[in-house]
Image (spheres, helix red, strand yellow):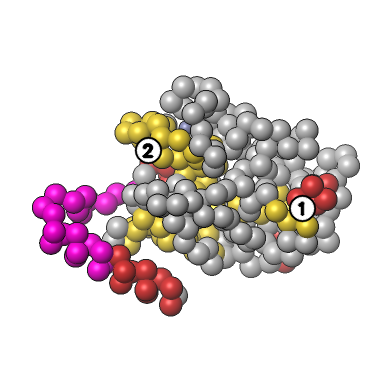
């Protein structure tokens, strides 16, 4: 909350500065929500404009089946062969989180690394994590990933790899990263196939199903991990990340 206040003041200051020095800065008062936000689960998320920012609130719950719901739950599904669950259930955690980003995010002057914890919010409502696991590399924890590339512990349910509950080798929206840029599946709507112009973060600037204007966005990179998975977003952030919490 404290950080938010400072960011707000800094933004206001920067705005008034540029406003007085130049006539036609991008002082577009008609900030509007991208249609991409329509794809976020309405039961799990609350998304609204706050000035030139968009606020994404989520209860952190996935809107799809998983073994991690626990037997007896309506969304419980039996695990696949070889799966080794962590001893945690989705219902055992409060995954409530808030992310506030610009409606018009820009690339930062230099990229920055992702860290442990939530680095994005998926359209399902649950968190996106990077390619690391708290107590070691993700590889040793991979057996605990459910069919949708997610697991729990020691925090809320979160995805590390391509979330097959709704996207698999396609151009669907995956979610939003903490720097405000959207992340899509392995293919791009602009060409219908795997993009060949991605930067080191899996990003590029092109049209999408949500924008006829070319905008910067990320993709899940089409690089196999452990012969089975596709990491969602190892980083780095090309924009300026906000805290998710
Ligand atoms: Zn994890
Ligand atoms: Zn693209």
Query: Which element carries disc 2, helix, strand or loop?
Result: strand
SS of the residue under disc 1: strand
Between 73 and 1, which is closer to the camera in this rendering? 1
Q: Which mark is residue 137?
A: 1
Q: Please state, as top left, top right, bottom left or bottom right, where the N terminus lies in the image.
A: bottom left
Q: Is residue 45 left or right of residue 73?
A: left
Q: Give the residue displayed 32% in from the left and 62% down from the top.
A: 50
Which quadrant of the structure image shows residue 214?
top left
Q: Is residue 232 magenta?
A: no
Please tell me whether residue 18 belongs to the stretch shown in magenta.
yes
Instruction: Please tell me in which quadrant of the rendered image residue 55 appears.
Output: bottom left
Q: Is residue 218 above or below residue 132?
A: above
Lower sequence index among marks 1 and 2: 1
Q: Residues within 10 Å of mark 2 (few under 14, many from 20)?
A: some
In the image, is residue 99 above or below residue 218?
A: below
Report the front residue among 173 and 117. Answer: 117
Question: Which x, y percent locates residue 216?
Answer: 41, 40
Q: Residue 62 in the image: state x and y as whole percent.
A: 63, 52
For this orientation, the residue located farthest to the bottom is: 2
Mark 2 highlights which residue? 215
Q: Around disc 1, counting alpha carbons within 10 Å, would you say few (fewer than 14), some (14 to 19), or many (20 or more)? A: few
Which residue is at 30% across, 58% downward?
52
Q: Vertically, is 190 above or below 6?
A: above
Q: Position of residue 102 (x, y in %)?
A: 36, 55
Question: What range is drawn magenta here?
Answer: 12-33
């Amino acid at each position: 909350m404290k950080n938010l206040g400072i960011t707000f003041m800094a933004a206001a200051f920067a705005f008034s500065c540029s406003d007085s020095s130049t006539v036609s800065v991008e002082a577009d008062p008609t900030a509007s929500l991208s249609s991409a936000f329509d794809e976020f689960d309405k039961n799990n998320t609350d998304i609204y404009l706050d000035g030139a920012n968009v606020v994404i609130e989520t209860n952190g719950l996935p809107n799809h089946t998983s073994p991690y719901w626990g037997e007896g739950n309506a969304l419980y599904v039996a695990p696949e062969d070889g799966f080794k669950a962590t001893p945690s259930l989705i219902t055992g955690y409060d995954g409530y989180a808030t992310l506030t980003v610009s409606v018009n995010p820009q690339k930062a002057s230099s990229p920055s690394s992702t860290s442990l914890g939530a680095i994005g919010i998926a359209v399902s409502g649950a968190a996106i994590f990077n390619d690391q696991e708290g107590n070691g590399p993700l590889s040793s924890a991979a057996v605990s990933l459910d069919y949708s590339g997610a697991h729990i512990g020691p925090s809320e349910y979160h995805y590390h790899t391509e979330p097959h509950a709704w996207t698999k080798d396609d151009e669907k929206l995956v979610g939003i990263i903490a720097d405000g840029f959207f992340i899509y599946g392995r293919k791009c709507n602009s060409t219908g196939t795997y993009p060949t112009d991605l930067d080191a973060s899996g990003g590029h600037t092109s049209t999408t199903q949500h924008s006829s204007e070319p905008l910067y966005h990320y993709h899940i990179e089409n690089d196999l991990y452990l012969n089975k998975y596709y990491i969602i977003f190892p980083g780095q952030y090309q924009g300026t990340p906000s805290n998710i919490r």
